[in-house]
Image (cartoon, rainbow, N blue to C red):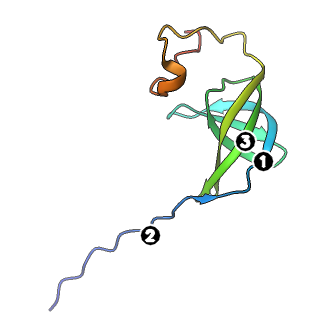
Amino acid sequence: MKPRSKQRPERTSAKRVAARVLEGRVRDVTDAGDSVVETEAGIVLVTGGFPGESVRIRTEEQRAGVTRGTLLAVLAASADRIEPACGIAARCGGCPLMGLSP
């Protein structure tokens, strides 16, 4: 009898979506540090926003029903937003919560 091979789940590749500039409110931050932004087009995940902030974003891609985008501007900042202690935090992306007050 021939052993069965383990089937891997099919990976879905990201598909580009038509870039749209949207405004929304950051509802939450995921464990991975992504901001959950509520927009008129639905939920979009971006990096760099904090709960309660109003932001302008651009949609980029969609994978498994999740739309990802880029933060373009913070329109109304959270009272908990601070200047990150690291000078390259915005470019590096390694510490997405560094700009949030403890």
Provide the residue designation for mark 1: 20
Q: In which quarter of the image is the C terminus?
A: top right
Measured in 3D between alpha carbons, the distance from the residue under mark 2 to the one under mark 1, in whole angstroms, is 28 Å
Q: Is residue 92 above or below residue 2?
A: above
Residue 43 pos. (x, y %): 72, 45
Mark 3 is on which residue type? Arg
Q: Residue placed at 51% from the left, 25% from the top?
A: 91
**x and y, in percent, of residue 2 in the image:** 17, 89
Q: Where is residue 56, by image quadrant?
A: top right
Badge 3 vs badge 1, beta-carbon distance below 8 Å: yes
Which residue is depicted at the point 72% across and 15% down?
78
97 with respect to 19 (left or right): left
**Mark 2 or mark 1, which has the lower sequence index?**
2
Three-letter residue code for mark 1: Arg
| Callout 2 secondary element | loop
Which residue occupies the extreme right position in the image? 40
- The residue beneath circle 2 is 10
- Could you say whether the residue bearing mark 3 is in a helix, strand or loop? strand
Residue that label 3 marks: 58
